Image (cartoon, helix red, strand yellow):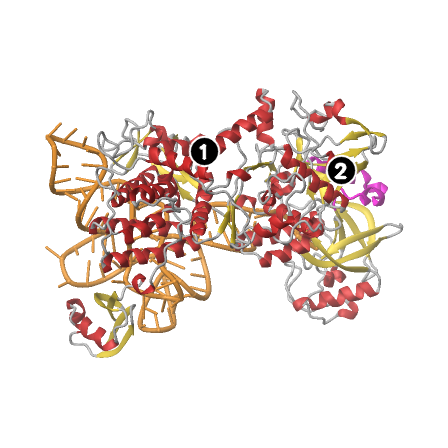
Amino acid sequence: MRRAPPSLYETPPRPPPGMLEGTMAYDPQRIEQHWQQWWDDKGTFVAKEDPAKKKFYALDMFPYPSGKGLHVGHPAGYTASDVVCRYRRALGFNVLHPMGYDSFGLPAEQKAIDEGVPPQKSTTEALDTFRRQLKRLGYSYDWTREVSTCDPGYYKWTQYIFTLLHKRGLAYQADAFVNWCAALGTVLANDEVIDGKSERGGHPVTRLQMRQWMLRITAYAERLLAGLDTIDWPDATRMHQRDWIGRSEGARIHFRVDGTSEDLEVFTTRPDTLWGATFLVVAPEHPAVARITTAAQKTAVEAYAKAASGKSEKDRQASKQKTGVDTGARALNPATGKPIPIWIADYVIYGYGTGAIMAVPGHDERDWEFAKEFHLPIVDVITGGDVTQAAHAGEGAMVNSGPFNGTATADGFAKAKVIDWLEQEKLGKREVTYKFRDWVFARQRYWGEPIPVLKDDQGKVVRTLELDELPLTLPPTEHYKPLGTGQSPLAALTDWVNVDDKKTGRKLKRETDTMPGSAGSSWYFLRYCDPHNDQELCARAKSDYWMPVDLYVGGAEHRVGHLLYSRMWQKVLKDEGLVRDEEPFQKLVHQGMIQGLIYRTPDKRIVPLAEVEERDGKAFKKGTDVELSIETGKMSKRYGNVVNPDDVIKLYGADALRVYICFMGPLESDKPWQTAGMEGQYNWLRRAWRVFFDDEDRPRVTDKEPTEEELRIIHKAIKKVGRDIDTLSLNTAISMLHVVVRDFLQLATTSRKCLEPLAQLIAPFAPHFAEEAWGKGLGKGDGITYAPWPKYDEALATDDTVTIGVQVLGKVRGEVTLRRDADEATAVAEARKVSGVARNLEGKQLVKVVYRAGKILNFIVK
RNA sequence: GCGAGAGUGGCGGAACUGGUAGACGCACCGGUCUUAGAAGCCGGAGGCAUUGCCGUGGGGGUUCGAGUCCCCCCUCUCGCACCA
């Protein structure tokens, strides 16, 4: 056995390499604590508005502070934004870099239910842990601006925003089909339901009709779509939001129900296929169903509807097999005047469009399958396919469509014509619908912002609370469990619920539902601009200065939830005149996940990391010869591969962790944590230390003039590192720094003109190290944070000689070193001297020479 | 099924507008130091083969030249999933 197994999993941890007795060396524990204290004392990162300076607002998605503390996943994004902030400060930007906590939510409440710990208490503790851990990583946050969504001074304004939404008619109560999770005792938003299960806990979710608070996000659909074209976000995320909003253009068409005064409305994107509509399909929940069903069909219809509503969303989608029942009623096709049957089927969704469709089996795959299943007529109304074999959804010309025969469907031409006709004949109208629904804005839970309204006995809202009545604080309780009735625990607190309202002189009741977790996080970026203001949610002058966010770093899992809600609130606040910008986040980047290694025995059993040892680059089960397979996957307790930043920092220091995180790979991609790789970066910092300090920890800097070679090294690095931070290619920036340190050690570089810029280039990544090198190593007094970023000389940053490949017939046969701008004749002459090239040219006739100065020389021969 | 993204050494990953594939790091091998080991330092290294050949998931194409551009296919990851 050659080396210790991954030391993170050993107890007690072995001392870091190089910390042997007597040797003075890089000591991260000492310097990191010292500089963190120093930054705190000096208020180095406190941001102040300064109109004379260009601002830069870098925002991290604030964490939900779980009791378990920080996970290595958190620093992945936080480190990247911190590097950018430190770089921007050196460039002279006025940087706002705040941090806070998304501290309302289910986990703390679940803990309260399970263990009886009040959420206020467990949240405060978790928050202290997070703050301590984040500070220990040396992030340059302005801690004076910290916010926490469960703080009454904060949620006062969340509640205030709710009252604004209510006044604008954007917050309303409605009987709606909601995602009810019985296990959690609450409703969930669509984005909190994944595959028919709750995002948190994976409990089953069913569709239920309930009276709920809703936010009319659909009213902002067009602006939410339009804004996507103005912001610098990943394409995948913008596309995902577009899909989620799901805009479609079409027509609403009226169908008379034969022999009744009922009217059924359908939404269709293909009004040009109206002549082919041979039946209607209505969602089982549709209220018209009960009215139109004939006596003969009543039993079958009711049975089907009941079965459909009992199914969860997931079950309903599990089978694509078409099912349905004829209601017995007939509708009149407004185009042909012919009676067509009306069916109910669960492939039609009540929440979308009008909850009823005209089925055109000839030109819609789903309708075609349904028609086949139930032997309903199929009519061809668009040329180009064989509707007896399959639905033809493509383009063609209208046929069997009366006056429209021959109209081409391409480019929506026929569609527009038919809609015009429908409007003229008052049979229907042009309409746009959206796939996304209004936002269910209530949870039947305790640990959230109380909704600031007063209601009468019937549950009708009498008034919202005025600003001077806010915050409406959460009353203390000892019973956190949702009541079995589908009400929140607040409903049991009758003293709190019943109010003698002085303003109206009436006996009123408080709302007992609370807001969802996404409420507080939908505007926190504004509060950071003016966190202590108790008169306004954020002074306009402050948000005008700092907003919009210039760089927002956070996980891709918030693509549609948080990132869509925040955009909506920003628009509402803009309409209120409270903010200037239409979009809150100018540039968005998603960090990838830090994955763990998963070890398995040949029979596929998982072996926790603590029981793994490495030998000769292979993994074995500790103390055996059982070789293990290695795969990458989620970090999870189950695999025993969760890495805690505290442990890493204890061994290697925060700087090494930061450098390793940056070095692992591109910010956006998922990458596996490898403790050995971590050690590599720690060792690099130790080597870098030796550039600045000798064996007795004395500074090595001299005022010697650097050689040209040394200057070239550092100028190239200044150029590369700056450019890489701009593009967030932090891994290649670190590679460059490796090269500089290697070369400077080899050249025994001590020149101040080289070491000062090197310390500065290291500073964004390993700030404590850099401060120590800058202060103690280079004798600088004021800290490195605001030292102006070094400038490079283009002439020195570019080599004037280059080594290029020499090819014969496209195959590399040698290389030559030339001046970058050497002419072709020189290049050819030099290349002919290279033996491998000469050998391949021998006896051949030169046809052509391809020469790209500084790039390639290629001889084409016969 | 639809949409998006990705396949490069043993591993993580580099490669500017097409121009010496494998930078940098890990692991590995050799040397040095040491009683020995660890760490450090110096050096090696894609594969096969002793002048050469093959190599960026596979197959075709464009080009003097392809990881990069075009066409077809395979695999993986992530979304969405009867949205009318």
Quadrant of res A155: top right
Seen in the picture, residue A787 relative to A272 is either above or below; the reply is above
From the image, which quarter does the N terminus of chain A lie in? top left
Q: The disc labelled 2 sits on which kind of residue?
A: Glu
Q: Which residue is mark 1?
A: A133
Image coordinates of residue A689 in percent, x first then y, are: 28, 42
From the image, which quarter does the C terminus of chain A lie in? bottom left
Between marks 2 and 1 in the image, the one whose residue lies nearer the viewer: 2
Q: Is residue A81 left or right of residue A754?
A: right
Image coordinates of residue A55 in percent, x first then y, are: 52, 52
In depth, the one of A485 and A258 nearer the eye is A485
Q: Is residue A516 visible?
A: no
Q: Is residue A323 magenta?
A: no
Q: What's the magenta region?
A: A283-311
In depth, the one of A816 and A269 nearer the eye is A816
Seen in the picture, residue A719 relative to A162 is either above or below; the reply is below
Is the residue at mark 2 from the same chain as the one at mark 1?
Answer: yes
